[in-house]
Amino acid sequence: WIEDVVVDSTSRGKGVGRKLINLLVQVGEEKELSEILLFTEDHRLAAINLYSSVGFKYKDSKIYCKKK
């Protein structure tokens, strides 16, 4: 699970969130995880766009999943 990734409002839009998520995905790949799950709420459109852009797909119950 990726949980509670938040970028301070003064640092948003600078690629910090993308770098964090990409690093977490890299660690997951190194650990040979079969999937990585995260949760976000429908109103967090920037987060949803970020997760989608790095390969996460919508899964039931507002959970996003990236499979190896």
Image (cartoon, rainbow, N blue to C red):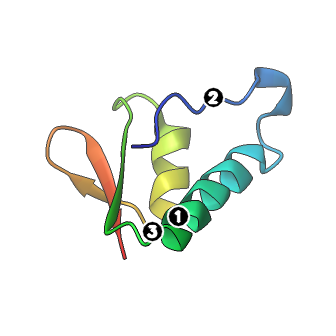
**Residue 39 in picture, x, y percent from top left:** 35, 37
Work out which quarter of the rendered image holds the N terminus and state it.
top left
**Residue 51 in picture, x, y percent from top left:** 48, 54
Question: Which residue occupies 45% across, 59% down?
Answer: 52
Q: What residue does disc 2 label?
A: 6
Q: CA distance from mark 1 to mark 2?
A: 17 Å
Q: In the rendered structure, which disc, 1 or 2, sits on the residue that comes first in sequence?
A: 2
Mark number displayed over residue 64: none
**Element type at marker 1?**
helix
Asked if residue 5 lies left or right of residue 59, the reply is right
Amino acid under label 1? Ser
Q: What residue does disc 3 label?
A: 55
| Quadrant in which residue 43 is drawn | top left
Mark number displayed over residue 53: 1
Q: CA distance from mark 1 to mark 3?
A: 6 Å
| Quadrant in which residue 46 is drawn | top right
Counting other residues with Cα less than 10 Å from the Cα at mark 1, is it few (<14), some (14-19), or many (20 or more)?
Answer: few
Amino acid under label 3? Gly
Work out which quarter of the rendered image holds the C terminus and state it.
bottom left
Amino acid under label 2? Val
